[in-house]
Image (spheres, grey):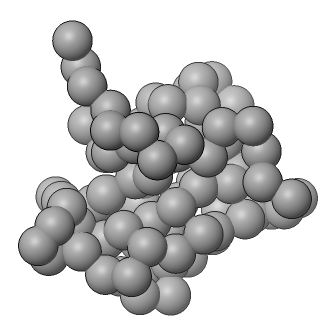
Amino acid sequence: MAASVVPHFANDGGVARIKVGVRELKCMGARPPYDHPHVYLDMGADTEILCPYCSTVYVHDEALDATASEPAGCLVAVHGHAHTDA
């Protein structure tokens, strides 16, 4: 079941691993027009998961909040709403 916050992440920098503060997320590869099908990923009890489209490894980091990532700037949206840094 989806968590109350399901952030969407993009890997524009092409890094191998992205640390996130959630275990459920959507990966879109890079931002449009270079995105792949937006796929829902659920780590369950594991601490990492591999995106089957772009091979990005998402690693759960309890120190990060639900909309944070390392490297920073990977968050695209939460609940289908565009994220702004304002």
Q: Residue furthest front?
A: 81
Task: Measuring from the top left, give residue 58's x and y in whole percent.
Answer: 53, 60
Q: Along the line of sight, which residue is nearer the eye, 81 or 3?
A: 81
52 left or right of 61?
left
Within the image, what quadrant is residue 34 found in?
Answer: bottom left
Q: Along the line of sight, which residue is nearer the eye, 57 or 9?
A: 9
38 left or right of 24?
left
- Residue drawn at x 69%, y 31% is 62
Viewer can see residue 4: yes
- Residue drawn at x 66%, y 37% is 5
Quadrant in which the N terminus is drawn: bottom right
Viewer can see residue 60: no
- Residue drawn at x 78%, y 54% is 2
- Residue drawn at x 46%, y 30% is 68
Q: In this rendering, is residue 86 above or below 83?
A: above
Within the image, what quadrant is residue 82 found in?
Answer: top left
Q: In this rendering, is residue 16 above or below 63?
A: below
Q: Residue furthest top?
A: 86
Quadrant in which the C terminus is drawn: top left
The total of numbered circles placed on residues is: 0
Task: Measuring from the top left, give residue 30's x and y in whole percent.
Answer: 22, 66
Task: Measuring from the top left, give residue 66's x and y in whole percent.
Answer: 59, 31
Task: Measuring from the top left, give residue 43's x and y in whole percent.
Answer: 74, 63
42 left or right of 75?
right
Within the image, what quadrant is residue 29 found in?
Answer: bottom left
15 left or right of 6?
left
